[in-house]
Amino acid sequence: MGHRKFENPKQGETKFVKGTPRGFVVPTRPKPAEPVTETHILRRGGIVAGPYGTPGFKYQGGDTHMSVRPVRDRQELSSRISQSLRAQNPIKRHPITISHREDARGSGAFWDHYTMRTTTGRTTEISHHREVTPTLQAPGHITAKQFTGDLPGARPDSGSGFGQGLLFIAGGNYGLLSETPRNTAHIPTSEDAQKRHQRRTGHEKDLLKHAQLTGRPVLGICGGSWQVLESFGGSTRGVKPKTHQTRKMPYLTSKGTVAKVASEHGVSVVPRTMLSSAFRDDSGSTPAKVNSAHWAVAEESAPGRLKGVPKVGARKEPLLKVSARGSTALDPPYLKKTGDYHQQSVEAFESRHGAPVMGIQWHPEAYGHGFPPTQTQANQRLLNWMAKAGDAYEARREMTQEFSKWVNTKRLQPTYLAKNKAFQLARRNTKLGLK
């Protein structure tokens, strides 16, 4: 192959290089694409939003030669953008849907609605089994020196459907059939109790299955967290008496405040979890103690691995992860302990993918007037955080329903959709051939 002579403009020297046949294109090695991560974006001064309105991710270290937007400027810009978007597209506040429980002649359900309304300032709805007529009765009509008043606000709407907003699963008197070892003291014995328990668990299984299929946020409290755990394939293990139990269950006093009778134990929240973002007081601190009223906890097959919860994706990560652990001197207080367990028992878990799903062992709704501010603020912020996730879920449903009106139609589209590039791209991808 011949050679050609050319003048090097840089050096001004004559060089000889191999020529390239005409019509032949020399393949070039493509430059590897830079990974787009939170750090990658933040290094360039970008904004990375946190889940459901929580603070965005913060780049914590490392030198960079790239232009970086100062942290304060980034936070101010993020705040202005968020305020502008909220003003233009206000998200409606939706009720919290509470799965109905029939125990204690309606006083248990009364507690659920009363405390959730007073802590979040929202209305609530009842979702019940089709064979149940829900009853709400103030506990003072059953037990002396307790609250005899009414719920704040109107009587909640009720129905056997799925309801709207956040799905709340409360605790109860009974454990799971999969609990190890099975606690005979928490198995319904009478025919009436068995019937009521079967109706409730059956209805909650339907609610939880629907939530998983539609991406609905779910919050399970105490025994309700076990129902959530079981819906993901998990199980529970009993704990020793006088470890995580309480002297007396919280109740409403005659003045409508929560009695400070529950025992407490230490809690350690796992960093970089949804819980660590939501469970904070006004100063950004997380309480070191929570009320304690349970006889079982989520079971682990190995430290950090919730038993029975499936793994998904290329990295084989479980659907649920541990987000808080107990920190008492007696942990882990398991009954008939076998195998290798983490030194601290599970106090909370949450979803790793998709919509926010949380199961927590303590009662955040039982913190109100008269409790230390750090506990009241953090627990109320946790409930409101999950309630806002319910608002986002409903906003997404409304948007999907609105878009569906125009996807499969030849009618003239509204201007806001005609100019929406994302919608038009999705519309083309459906290959409907519409003009």
Image (tube, rainbow, N blue to C red):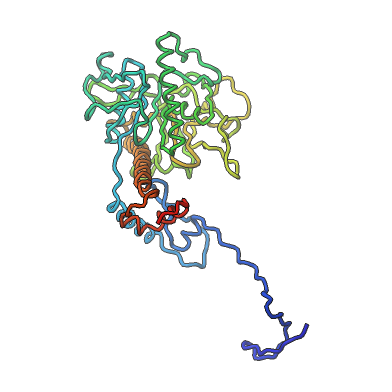
Give 92 or 229, whichever is nearer the viewer: 92
Q: Position of residue 158 (x, y in %)?
A: 30, 26
Q: Residue at x 62, y 87 (%)?
A: 10
Decide if residue 346 is on the left or right side of residue 143: right
Q: What residue occupies the far top of the structure in this picture?
A: 190
Give 380 or 168, whichever is nearer the viewer: 168
Query: How many discs mark residues in the rendered view?
Result: 0
Displayed quadrant of residue 206 = top left
Q: Residue at x 28, y 18 (%)?
A: 139
Quadrant of the image for the C terminus? bottom left
Displayed quadrant of residue 256 = top left
Quadrant of the image for the N terminus? bottom right
Displayed quadrant of residue 135 = top left
Q: Position of residue 118 (x, y in %)?
A: 27, 32
**Residue 80 vertical placement versus 173 (above, below):** below
**Residue 70 vertical placement versus 27 (above, below):** above
Give 266 or 214, whichever is nearer the viewer: 214
Q: Position of residue 145 (x, y in %)?
A: 25, 16
**Residue 83 vertical placement versus 99 (above, below):** below
Q: Position of residue 38 (x, y in %)?
A: 49, 55
Give 251 or 421, whichever is nearer the viewer: 421
Decide if residue 415 is on the left or right side of residue 343: left
